[in-house]
Image: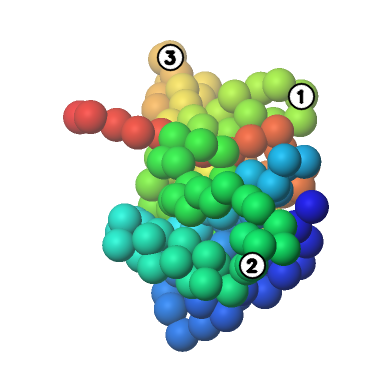
């Protein structure tokens, strides 16, 4: 089986001096290599092809055969690395917390492992007969949620 660290080193070399970042590398038992990259402005197919060729040029099929797939992290897929959270600050996200509660709102801030989502909710305000819509901030930790993903909107 092809060593994941070898592939990671190759990807890191290619990523050097580029604004892309690595989201994940998976290698199956039958040597299918899947590399996911991302960029704040989206991923260009030409760059996926370039990275794929770079990896192919540095691995020897005569020693060990493999299948290679290079692509972008899916837009509606859960975030896997902190840089994805940073790229989506100001955008609508959906969070499924550890207790199974879904929260949908604007990703407001990211600080290390912590992030904040602002949610419009009806809140009972003293002196008012009816609840008033206000933004309520929810704090989460990346490693304590089941998932966070970008909400695709066609408004």
The residue at the far front in this view is: 62
Vertical arrangement, residue 2 with respect to residue 75, above or below: below
The residue at the far left in this view is: 155
Residue for badge 1: 99
Q: CA distance from mark 3 to mark 1?
A: 32 Å
Q: Can you tell which mark lies on residue 67?
A: none
Colour mode of the rendering: rainbow
> Which residue appears at 41% of the width and 25% of the height?
132
Mark 2 is surrounded, within 10 Å at the Cα level, by few (under 14), some (14 to 19) or many (20 or more) other residues, namely few
Q: Work out whether residue 40 or residue 92 is closer to the camera in this orientation and state it.
A: 40
Position of 93 with respect to 12 (left or right) is left
Q: CA distance from mark 2 to mark 3?
A: 72 Å
Residue for badge 2: 60
- Please state the horizontal and vertical placement of residue 82, each as a whole percent of the image: 61, 59
Residue 76 found in image quarter = top left
- Please state the horizontal and vertical placement of residue 24, each as a whole percent of the image: 62, 54
* Of the image marks 2 and 3, the number of the one nearer the N terminus: 2
Of tags 3 and 1, the one toward the viewer is: 1
On the question of residue 81 being in view, the answer is: no
* Of the image marks 2 and 1, the number of the one nearer the N terminus: 2
Vertical arrangement, residue 37 with respect to residue 97, above or below: below
Label 3–label 1 contact, CB within 8 A: no
Residue for badge 3: 129
* Quadrant in which the C terminus is drawn: top left
Q: CA distance from mark 2 to mark 1?
A: 46 Å
Residue 11 found in image quarter = bottom right
Q: Work out whether residue 78 or residue 141 is closer to the camera in this orientation and state it.
A: 78
């Amino acid at each position: 089986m092809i060593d994941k660290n070898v592939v990671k080193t190759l990807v890191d070399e290619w990523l050097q001096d580029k604004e892309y970042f690595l989201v994940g590398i998976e290698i199956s038992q039958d040597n299918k290599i899947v590399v996911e990259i991302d960029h704040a402005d989206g991923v260009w197919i030409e760059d996926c092809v370039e990275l794929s060729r770079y990896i192919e040029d540095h691995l020897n099929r005569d020693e060990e055969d493999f299948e290679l797939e290079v692509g972008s992290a899916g837009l509606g897929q859960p975030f896997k690395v902190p840089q994805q959270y940073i790229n989506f600050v100001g955008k609508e996200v959906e969070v499924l917390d550890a207790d199974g509660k879904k929260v949908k709102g604007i990703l407001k801030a990211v600080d290390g492992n912590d992030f904040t989502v602002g949610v419009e909710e009806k809140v009972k305000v003293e002196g008012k007969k009816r609840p008033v819509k206000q933004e309520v901030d929810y704090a989460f930790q990346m490693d304590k949620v089941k998932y966070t993903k970008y909400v695709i909107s066609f408004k």
